[in-house]
Image (cartoon, rainbow, N blue to C red):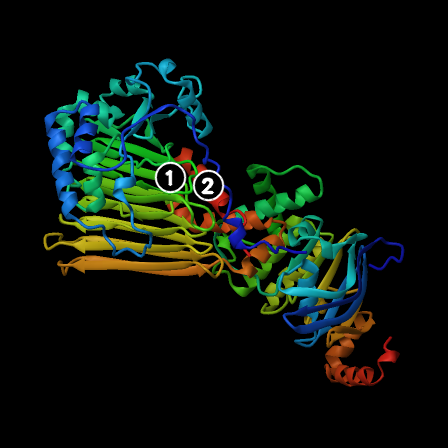
Amino acid sequence: MIRPDAPVLLEIRDLQARVEDQPILKGVSLTIRAGEIHAVMGRNGSGKSTLSKVLAGHPAYTVTGGSVHYRGEDLLALEPEQRARLGLFLGFQYPVEIPGVSNLEFLRVATNARRSGKGEEELDTFAFEDLVKERLQVVQMDPAFLERSVNEGFSGGEKKRNEILQMALLDPLVAVLDETDSGLDIDALRIVAGGVNHLAGPDNATLLITHYQRLLDVITPDYVHVMAAGRILRTGGKELALELEERGYDWVDAELAATERAPAEVV
Amino acid sequence: MTSTATVGDLVSQPYKYGFITDIETEKIAKGLSEDVVRLISAKKKEPAFLLDFRLRAYRQWLQMEEPDWASLGHPPIDYQEIIYYAAPKQQEKKASLDEVDPKLLETFDKLGIPLSEQKRLSNVAVDAVFDSVSIATTYREKLAESGVIFCSISEAVKDHADLVEKYLGTVVPGNDNYFAALNSAVFSDGSFVFIPKGVACPMELSTYFRINSGDTGQFERTLIVAEEGASVSYLEGCTAPMFDTNQLHAAVVELVVLDDASIKYSTVQNWYAGDENGKGGIYNFVTKRGQCRGDRSHISWTQVETGSAITWKYPSCVLQGADSVGEFYSVALTNNRQQADTGTKMIHVGPRTRSTIVSKGISAGHSSNSYRGLVQIGPKAVGARNYSQCDSMLIGDQAAANTYPYIRSQQPDASIEHEASTCRISADQLFYLQSRGIAFEEAVSMMVSGFCRDVFNQLPMEFAAEADKLLALKLEGSVG
């Protein structure tokens, strides 16, 4: 939902970042307002996953230039946990397994951390159990998953559902979902997408990072950005994704070659 | 910007029990000789059998050599530089707590072990040992109603000499090993527990050991006897002030369990560990052994070892009675320059004896943490079974973890299982938790307590939460 007067939640300007000595992001700019769904598409290695990690504050990535403001605040100055408490959420492409840490306990601690960020009171064990049972329905997840260790022994689809469950509990203002569709069969994809659609509202925004059109068949983006070589090459509406699907990424390469010859003409 | 703190920093929390109580102490001169052994025995007005026991052990100790097979390194210990007896100046053990020096009560208050009637733990009887002597034991009368004897070993020597003579040194003989021999010669105090036939001890028993003097060794001796069908759960805790010299702690614990009886023995060890460069700290050389003498008897050791510069400790079970059961649950955490070589021995003698070993080692900083365990199945232990699980967790990249399992079986019918694993707290796991709003320190402590859960579940409920907190404190500032 595009409303030009909606408040800006995330303002990324000329963001540059490297991992070890390798520059990955070479000047990304993106403005996200409340109510919007953005999709960033691109080939492997285009920098789209790096963008999500940098936004969440992964320590392996070093920001070398540019700025990110989250509701007017300097996001890059915050620790990862502070970003999360203020409502930035990263749905991981490969959620890690954490043996020994109970999923229920983890979800409760995380939910309470986010609540403290919103200035709300912490939930006790019972109130939390009520909440989590309700939110489980968003992703049609079996309560048995709560009793297990975080992601331990979960299938790919179960891990992704667990990510969306966390999103449902943490009530983020900006959710960055990194390749949430990868490794999902069509039923799981529908459930996960259903969860994302359910949670999208006029006050929050979603940034989908994806490789394929098929996620965008079930979640309709307001904006599609095509990323290549660490930059956003083109921005358009949902039809841009269809164009990508039809023409493949080869034209991106051609366009990229052209911009590299004449960098001044980049739009 | 983001967490530049290392897992290493997280483990180096200042030691909060490092204070010294300023109290007048009676000490004997440094050094060890036959005269010193006689002097200790005389000060405690001991019967002849005990002096004999001490002297025999001392003479054997003279012939023995300090063991060097453990993965531990330390400068030689000068046994003549140690004071073997120190006691706060208060003549006799007081009948009532009101007469105990308030400074001592205050000390235990500060350690979180209130002894006074109003504040003491409601369901735990405590024996408080300060340097070489026991200063108070709570709930004695209430325990006596069920026939349970819980007192310092010095009092037991006076009041229950027959029991002491019958059982002392029967599980860990005076010449068992170098440190046990030393302890047998000079032990000063410790706890004595006797649970008569058929009695389930109505409350948790606990001994709290506090070293206060700087140049004193601590040599306590604990003896617990559970008669037929009796049961008891016992917990010991330990702390010491921070000194920049090393102090020797060589304790002996003996458990005797008769038919259908059970003893659950838990330890939370938090002796001063030395500073981050390894200066100071306790050398903890401890011999703990239990004997399942009776059929269907049961011994369970649970230990949480977080302190000491050096830990050398192998709580063991001799499974003599048919169908007897031995268990060992251990968490050993080392940080900075700490060294631990700890594990257990399960000696299966009787038929259908069973043992379980669960060991969790956590190494951070530049520390070294070894599990060393023996499972021995004798020729008569038909149908004996053992299950061992040894897991190590590494924090940072400078720490060492080793596992030395020894398995000897003379019984083809026995079943022995051993599992081992090593893991590291990964940066990606920490980031995952952080990206959900969980602070770095809390993320580490969640993972560590998750790793230790199997063991913490074995601790008495009152102390499980404490152990969790203790580990979190120890790890503060150490992950990265």
Disc 2 target residue: B470
Q: Can residue B212 be seen in this view?
A: yes
Residue B204, horizontal then vertical, whole percent = 33, 29
Task: Return the disc, 1 or 2, that comes first in the chain's sequence.
Answer: 1
Dot 1: within a 10 Å radius of its alpha carbon, few (fewer than 14), some, or many (20 or more) residues? many
Residue for point 77% across, 59% down: A68
Q: Nearer the viewer, residue B154 or B471?
A: B154
Which chain's residue wears label 1? B
Q: Is residue A259 left or right of residue A150?
A: right
Provide the secondary structure element on which disc 1 rests: strand
Dot 2: within a 10 Å radius of its alpha carbon, few (fewer than 14), some, or many (20 or more) residues? some
Q: In this view, does B260 lie to the left or right of B369?
A: left
Q: Which of A112 and B269 is in front in this view?
A: B269
Per the model, the C-alpha gap separating discs 1 and 2 is 9 Å
Disc 1 target residue: B268
Which chain's residue wears label 2? B
Mark number displayed over residue B23:
none
Residue for point 22% across, 28% down: B195
Q: What residue type is labelled 2?
A: Leu
Q: Which of B299 and A252 is in front in this view?
A: B299
Q: Nearer the viewer, residue A78 or B461?
A: A78
Q: Can residue B250 be seen in this view?
A: no
